[in-house]
Image (cartoon, rainbow, N blue to C red):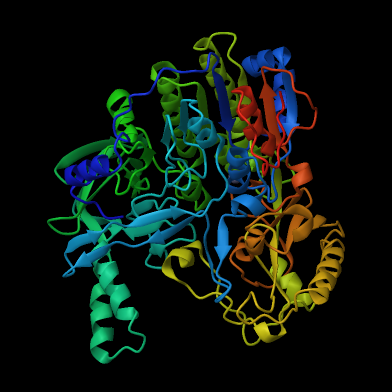
Amino acid sequence: MTRFPRVPILALVCVLTTGACGRTLSPSAFPHKLVVLGFDGLDPTLTRRWMDEGKLPNMARLAARGSFTALETSHSPESPTAWASFATGVNAGKHNIYDFLVRDTRTYVPDLGMVRREPPRFLLNYIPIAKPRILSIRGGTSFWVSAGRAGVRSSVLTVPVTFPPEEVPNGELLSGLPLPDIRGTMGTFSYFASDLSRYEEGNTEFGGILRRLVFEGDTARAELVGPPNPIVRARQREIRSKGTLNDADRAALAELEAQEDISLPFTVRWDRSARRATIEIQGSTIQLGEKQWSKWLLLDFRANLLIRLHGMAQMYLIAAGNDLQLYVSPINWRPDAPPVPMSFPASFAADLYKTQGIYRTLGWAEATWPLNEGRLDEKAFMDDLYRAFDDRAGVILNRLNGGQWDLLVGVIESTDRVQHMMWRLLDPGHPMYDAALAREFGDSIERVYRRCDQFVGEVLDHLDPGTPVMIVSDHGFHSFRYAVNLNTWLVQEGFMTLHGQQPGEKKLDDLFGGGEFWENVDWSRTRAYAMGLGQIYFNLRGREAQGIVDPGDEYRRLAEELSSRLLTMTDPETGQRIVRAAYKRDDIYSGPYLGNASDLQVGLEEGYRVSWQTTLGGTPAGIVYPNMKKWSGDHGAYDYQATAGVLISSRKLGTDRPRIIDIAPTVLTYFGLRIPADLDGKALF
Ligand SMILES: [Zn+2]
C-alpha cells in the first residue's frame, strides 16, 4: 500500500521491461472483432420476463439474431469462482478460486481469497526498500493472454479476479475485483453523526467506521481514517515476530497502536437554519445541502516525507436539520497514482483518467454495506449505484471507440449489487419486504436491467453489424429469506464438537484484524467444519493441523454419510427441506489445486442461504433464522443447477446447454486459435 516516489519507479519498470510502457500495437492480423460484455448476476428468469414484456429491446434484438439461453455457472456459484472459470475455461480445481475465502489448514483461520499480500519493507523505519506486493492465487491461463500471445489485441475492462493485473500480450487491462480501497479492504465507508451514541461508535460488521461529531457552537472537528501507516505496521510486525515480548515491547506496541492509521483532520461547520454544512479538508472547502453528494475529493495521506498515498472519496450530507449526519465513501485509489499498478500497462489506468476524467476504481464499487447497516437509505444507495454503473460503462465505451482492439471484454457488476440489496422489495415473502418501500423502490432491479439494455444499445451502435457480441452473466439470483447455521447443524448432528461457552460473534473486520476464530472447537473430536458460502471441509489427517479423519476409506465414508444426512436437514418451523444437493469434491473438481477444494459443496434450496456467521466459521444458537438484513438476494451457497447465469449471443450456438467454461474456448476458436488440451470447456460456435 505504500506510495513510492513515482517517476523513478516507473522509469525503472520501463527500463527493465522494455516495450511494456509504450503501447505501440502492431496492426491486427485478425480481420474480425469480437465483443464480450458481462453483467454480474444477470438472472435468466428476470431477463426472460422483462425481454418478453418488451422492456429490454436491445437484448431481445440480439437474441432474435442469435440465441438466448441460461449459462451453467461454476461450483461454487460465486462471482470470483465463476469469472475465473469464464477467463480460463476450466473448473476451480485448475484455477484455484473456490470461494471469496481461503482457509489456512495449519490454523483453520479464514482469509480473503484471490490474492496473497507481501508487505513493504523499510530501512531505518523510514526509507522504503521493498515495494508491497500483491500476488494473484489464480491458476490457469485467461483467454485474453492465450489470444494475445497469438497476436490478438485485447482490451479487458474491470473483469472480476483481474487484480493484480496480468501482463496481457498485445493488450490492455484495467483491474476489477478484488481491487481494494486505500485501507486494503473491499470498501470501508465512514459515517460521522452528531446523534451517534458512544455505544454505536467504532467499526461495524461490514467495515464501516462510525464516529460521533461533537459540535462546539456551529463547528465540529473530526478525523477521516485513511490507510494503515505502512511504517507503523512494519514495526508492529517486527516486534510481534520476536515471539516472547518483554514489557518494553508491549509498551512500544501500545504506542504504535495509536498511530496505526494515517488520518486527515477536517472541520464541519453547520448552518442549522439553512440545513447545510461546510466541510474543510486538506485545503478544500465543500458546501453541501441535505441529500447532496460532493464531487470526488482528491486526498493525500502522508506517512513520512518519502511516502505519500493518494486517494479519492465522495461525501454525502445525509441530514443537517435536528442532527447532522455525514457519509464518506470508501477511499478509492486514484487511477493516476495507485499504490501498486492497477492496470496493464501500468500507465493505462492513468491514460483513461486523462481522457475520461475521474472514475471509481474500487472493485466492489457500490455502497452495499452502508445500506445494509442502515447508514444510507435506498435513494442514496441507488443514486450512487447508477453512477458506479456509469463509470464502468464510460470506461468500456471509451475503449470501444478509442482503442485498437480485436477482442473487447468488459464487465459491470452493479447488476449483482442491486439484486443483493433490493431483492426483498421484489419478494413479498421476504421477511424484509416493505410494501411502502416496494412502491417506491420495487422496480430498482428492473431499472438497472433496463440500464444494461440501454448500454447494450449504445455498444451495438458503435459496432459494425458483422461484429459478434456475447452478453454473459456469471450466475443468477435467489431470495435470501432465511439464514442457515451450517456449523451449528454440524454440532447438533455430531460432526463437530465444542467445548466451553458460545464464543462472541465473528465480524468481517476480524479477517483484516486477525480476530479469534474457532476458539471453542474441539478439533480432536471434530470431523467436519463449514466456512465460506456452502463449503464443508473435513478435518483430514495430514492436511489439517489437528486432523482426525483418515484419507481413503474413512474420508469416503464421511463424504457419503454427511452428504446424505445434509439432504435430510429441514426447517424446524415449516418442515421444508433446506438442502437441495450436496456435491462431493472428487465429483465436481479436478486439477492441480484439488487439495484446496472443500470436501463437500452444499447447494441450498430457494429462500435459504448459509448465515454470515457460518461463512466465518461461527456457531450461533439455532439452525434457521429469518434474514432481517437488507442484503436479501444471493447466489453463493445455492445449488449451481438452479443458479445459472445468462448467455445472449448474436451468433447461433451449437448447443442449448452452454456453460461458463465454454466462453474461453469459444473466443479462441473464433480467432482461429488452438484450444489447449487441458481446457474443460468446448467452443459454442
Ligand atoms: Zn454477488
Report the side of 333 relative to 48 (left or right). Answer: left
Residue in view at x 45 percent, y 21 percent: 405
The vertical placement of 500 against 38, above or below, is below
Residue 463 in view here:
yes
Q: For the N terminus, which image quadrant?
A: bottom left
Q: Residue furthest top?
A: 465
Q: Position of residue 20 (x, y in %)?
A: 33, 36
Point out the quarter of the image occupied by ligand 1.
top right
Q: Position of residue 390 (x, y in %)?
A: 44, 27
Report the side of 592 relative to 378 (left or right). Answer: right
Towards the viewer: 577 or 67:
67
Residue in view at x 47 percent, y 36 percent: 158
Q: For the C terminus, which image quadrant?
A: top right
Report the side of 652 relative to 254 (left or right). Answer: right
Q: Position of residue 681 (x, y in %)?
A: 70, 38
Q: Quadrant of residue 661?
A: top right
Q: Quadrant of residue 673?
A: top right
Residue in view at x 82 percent, y 62 percent: 573
Q: Quadrant of residue 273?
A: top left
Residue in view at x 57 percent, y 38 percent: 418
Towards the viewer: 407 or 174:
407
Residue 446 in view here:
no
Instruction: Count the marks.
Output: 0
The vertical placement of 655 against 345, above or below, is above
